[in-house]
Amino acid sequence: MKFVDKVFDDTLMSFLQAMDPEKAHDLSVKTLSRGMGPTLPPPDDPTLGVTVWGKRFNNPLGLAAGFDKNALVPDACMRMGFGHVEVGGITPRPQEGNDPPRLFRLTEDGAVINRMGLNNEGMVVAYQRLAKRNRWEDRGFVGVNLARNADTPNERAADDYATLAALLHAQCDFMVLNLSSPNTDDLRALQEPEAMRAIIRRVRAATPTDAPPLLLKMSPDLTEAQMDDLAAVALEPENPLDGIICANTTTTRPEGLKNPARDEDGGLSGTPIKALSLARLRSMADRLFGKVPLVSVGGVDCAADVIERLRAGASLVQLYTALIYGGYRLVPQIKADLLEAMKEQGIGSMEEIIGADMKVSA
Ligand SMILES: Cc1cc2nc3c(=O)[nH]c(=O)nc-3n(C[C@H](O)[C@H](O)[C@H](O)COP(=O)(O)O)c2cc1C
């Protein structure tokens, strides 16, 4: 990292940490949208690359949904060093989300609780921004995180997802059905098999056969039986899924959280969900590894986590909360540490360790 970037990063981070969390987020996005952010990093070492859905990702690390909710700064986020960026959640119509305060830093825990409620400017604004981009695939891929509006009842949710996919599929590299945000009433009930089937069927019907890969983002709070259902649906030939993102924030609260904000309603993310997220990845890999690509997200904040998730069966790994605490230098640091770890552990490429733990136990 260049000296000037480091000074900028340090100053910005201490300033942002002292601010109200939502205002700090909005300011980060605004500074990025004005071109004040990381400069274009050097190309990634080719050994960091992974191929998924026939696409060559420069590195396995992506920015999870929720940071760039309105597709304002995907390319600026890519310059932080990510191989892909998931924008959204985007709903068909704009919506305000829940009343503030709705975002809480649990600094001592390396965690965040949010009950944003999918605040966003709606799909037309996102479409216009994405359509204006110069899509250079060698710079990284952009996914869109899609969700129903808060006032659309679950019986009509498939209409929302189909409308979103019909408009946005040509402007992205993958689409994500968000059926797992905990802050929209009843949204997570859409992970019931018949609801999932209806949504996938309608989205497939609304998009051409060469539309980008269709993924589903699951909750980490699913039971074993619900994970069985999800895996079964993902494999059904009539409505197959191209990938599963594992997982969203949790409404559970692990023991030992120190910050009093632990009692706020909403979804918990960051370090305290590391173990939960990894456990869910392992459960889904037991069911789907080698059949449906898995993307792991939840508590990832270092190279060892990335290696662990890939070995457990993830093809790609995402993070968000770690960026709130680590700033713009986090991703370059993780990538440098990955290269170092690869040398030490005799790993030739990121790709070769995907599912290594599965193969050992198989
Ligand atoms: C403030 C905030 C907003 C989020 N918004 C979304 C969203 O709109 N859609 C979604 O699928 N996940 C959303 N997430 C969940 C993240 O994408 C991710 O799944 C979760 O935070 C776990 O990863 P992490 O521990 O690296 O943050 C949000 C998370 C946070 C902290």
Image: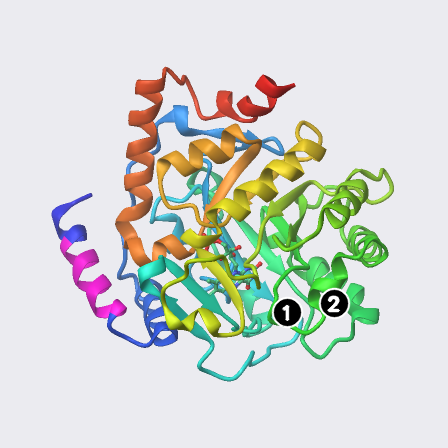
Q: Is residue 11 magenta?
A: yes
Q: Residue at x 17, y 63 (%)?
A: 11
Q: Which x, y percent locates residue 329?
A: 26, 48
Give the x, y percent position of residue 184: 64, 72
Q: Horizontal and vertical percent for residue 217?
A: 63, 52
N-terminal of the two: label 1 or label 2? 1
Q: Secondary structure at mark 2?
A: helix
Residue, disc 2: 160
Using the rendered image of the protein, determine whether residue 59 is visible from the camera's viewpoint. Answer: no
Q: Residues within 10 Å of mark 1 (few under 14, many from 20)?
A: many
Q: Where 139 falls versus 154 (above or below)?
A: above
For this view, does 249 lie left or right of residue 111? Answer: right
Q: Is residue 216 visible?
A: yes
Work out how far the residue at label 1 is from the one at label 2, CA to CA, in angstroms.
8 Å
Helix, strand or loop at mark 1: loop
Q: Residues within 10 Å of mark 2 (few under 14, many from 20)?
A: many
Residues 53 and 241: in front is: 241
Q: In what quadrant of the picture does the C terminus appear? A: top right
Residue 71 is one of the magenta-drawn residues = no
- Do the numbered discs 1 and 2 sit on residues whose CB atoms are within 8 Å? yes
**As rendered, which of 100 and 8 lies closer to the eye?**
100
**Residue stretch in magenta:** 7-17
